[in-house]
Image (cartoon, rainbow, N blue to C red):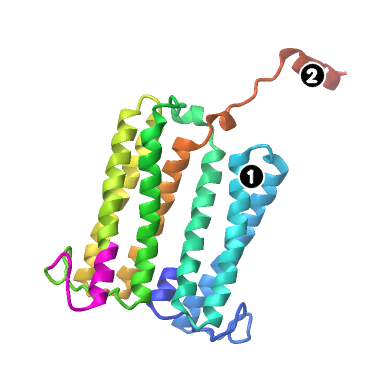
Amino acid sequence: MGGFVRVTDSGMACGDDWPLCDGQLVPAFNFEVFLEYAHRVSGAVLIILILIIFIYAWRLHRNDPWIFKSATAALVFVIAGAGFGAATVFSELGWGFRLIHLAIAEAVIGSLAFALVGSLNFNNYEINTPAEGSMASGTVYMFGMMLSLFLLIISGSIMVGLDAGTACGTWPLCNGSLFPQGDTRYSIHMGHRLIGIVVGVMMLLAFAWIWRMREWISGAGKVAMLLFVLMVVQVLLGAVLVWTGFAPGWRAIHLSGGSLVWLVACVLFAVIFVSRETSSDPEVDVKESSTIYGEFSS
């Protein structure tokens, strides 16, 4: 929804009023107001759902650091995201606030992904714990992939904020050149594409490591395959975006695709690095179980 609000220039449809829309809880709707209002309502629903997750984690999983800390982080980030959403409106869509707002949104996605993976029973997904020494190279590849992917998403927002989103009218080169001259916007736009190449290289290195470790983390291979497919689709969407003259609908789809790739990457990262001990079911002592049963029967 945020992507559609941005590409349709609907961010100020409710004026500089927040959280109300032109001073009203339910305003008079047109297309732009509907998009902005739906974005705010979906954000409010998200806050409520994450608050429920946090309460659930606090009551039942305080001793599980992956679930509790991830749920806490998600709650902190979503509240911060709402605050920067308000700052974005008050600043009349200052691109710096929009950039931070997007970064926080991706942090919310990452936190929820870790909470999700932390709640899974890994025994059901054929995932084991690799030897410590075998994790060294994979740690570098995975961290490199996550960092470059996050920078790719942020660079896309910077590109749009600096009015360079439509600077290059051809793909994959920019006006026939890898390093175009004559306008700084060309360099900004191509910088986003070059970071995408770095992401692709880091993903291939990470996938190659996961393939070598398939005996230990076979379940991660399926997530990696999904991530690879989504990344290829995202690259093609970027090309279609250029070929269609940067149509607003394709811009929103491209942004949404980036967040989907980030979500799956976070799940893959968590699947590999979440401690397997959190998913094991403690065995109930037979003597204790018999005693409890006896008390109930009496």
Q: Give residue 241's position: percent from left, percent from top.
A: 25, 68
Looking at the rendered structure, the secondary structure element under dot 2 is helix
Q: Nearer the viewer, residue 72 or 257?
A: 72
Residue 174 placement, left or right of 94: left
| Residue 247 visible here | yes
Query: In the image, is 57 to the left or to the right of 85?
Result: right
Q: Residue at x 50, y 31 (%)?
A: 122
Q: Nearer the viewer, residue 217 or 21?
A: 217
Q: Position of residue 296 (x, y in %)?
A: 83, 22
Asked if residue 1 can be seen in this view, the reply is no
Location of the C terminus by quadrant is top right
Q: Is residue 111 above or below residue 26?
A: above
Q: Residue at x 38, y 40 (%)?
A: 140
Is residue 279 shown left or right of residue 125? right
Q: CA distance from mark 2 to mark 1?
A: 32 Å
Q: Residues within 10 Å of mark 1 (few under 14, many from 20)?
A: many
Magenta range is: 177-192
Examine the image and state in which quarter residue 215 appears: top left
In the image, residue 257 sits, relative to residue 293, either above or below, namely below
Q: Position of residue 72 (x, y in %)?
A: 63, 51
Q: Nearer the viewer, mark 2 or mark 1?
A: 1
Question: Can you give x and y, in whole percent of width and height, for residue 176 in the image?
Answer: 11, 69
Does residue 28 lie above or below 148 as drawn?
Answer: below
The three-letter code of the residue at mark 2 reads: Tyr
| Residue bearing the label numbered 2 | 293
Disc 1 residue type?
Answer: Phe
